[in-house]
């Protein structure tokens, strides 16, 4: 069993936010491999199935970002999976738009969803699939950046990145994280450009 987690905030208001690219990645992976149907479990939307012959559970916590650990911890405890069997897809400010990096363990780098999961019984040693959204260049603009929607001009690289995450998934399932990273960047080379910023209303728990 592998637990594939996408991070985001629930509801249509947030659906196209940069902060929700983890949800988007899981949706594309689930669709490509026929996971489902989606059901409400573990304070999340969950879909079961198999990828490359391995049973997987796709999970989108519905707790708001900064409480993601409640959902992920509950699912991990139920299936008795180790941190190595948990892969979390999420937005990464410190990577340029369209870049992708795999990482195991380490700090949260200010990401409240990752911080919440690390504080759960799972601990910090889970696998992280980091989807670059770029940094607005000013710390004061970070919240409006992550809770703002992708711009029209971002659509091509976002779609390419998400499709690559799904196409290369058998490598992830096999535990070949470095090969998974390399294949994604081969399939979806990142565009080098400054991220656009759009204002967003912020509510408690979203970021």
Image (cartoon, rainbow, N blue to C red):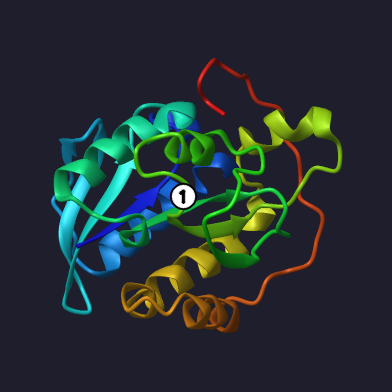
Image vertical order of residue 93 relative to residue 71, above or below: below
- Is 175 or 194 nearer to us in this picture? 175
**Based on the displayed image, in which of its 4 quarters is residue 172 positioned?**
bottom left
Indicate left or right for 151 with 120 as reference: right
- Is 115 or 179 nearer to us in this picture? 115
- Is 15 or 53 nearer to us in this picture? 53
**SS type, badge 1:** helix
Q: Quadrant of the N terminus?
A: bottom left
* Number of numbered discs overlaid on the protein picture: 1
Residue lying farthest to the top in this orientation: 204
Q: Quadrant of the C terminus?
A: top right
Residue at screen point 59% across, 66% down: 101
**Mark 1 highlights which residue?**
22
Residue 15: x and y in percent read 46, 38
Mark 1: give few (<14), some (14-19) or many (20+) Cα within 10 Å: many
Indicate left or right for 54 with 112 as reference: left
């Amino acid at each position: 069993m592998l637990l594939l987690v996408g991070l985001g905030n629930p509801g249509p208001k947030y659906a196209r936010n940069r902060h929700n690219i983890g949800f988007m990645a899981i949706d594309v992976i689930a669709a490509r491999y026929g996971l489902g149907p989606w059901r409400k479990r573990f304070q999340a939307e969950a879909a079961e199935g198999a990828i490359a012959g391995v049973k997987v559970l796709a999970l989108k916590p519905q707790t708001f970002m900064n409480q993601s650990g409640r959902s992920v911890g509950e699912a991990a405890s139920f299936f008795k999976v180790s941190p190595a069997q948990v892969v979390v897809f999420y937005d990464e400010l410190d990577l340029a738009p369209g870049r992708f990096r795999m990482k195991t363990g380490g700090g949260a780098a200010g990401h409240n969803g990752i911080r919440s999961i690390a504080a759960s019984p799972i601990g910090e040693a889970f696998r992280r699939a980091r989807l670059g959204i770029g940094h607005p260049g000013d710390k004061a603009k970070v919240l409006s950046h992550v809770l703002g929607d992708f711009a029209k001009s971002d659509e091509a690289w976002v779609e390419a990145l998400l499709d690559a995450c799904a196409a290369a998934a058998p490598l992830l399932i096999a535990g070949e994280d470095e090969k998974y990273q390399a294949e994604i960047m081969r399939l979806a080379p990142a565009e080098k450009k400054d991220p656009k910023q759009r204002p967003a209303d912020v509510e408690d728990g979203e970021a």
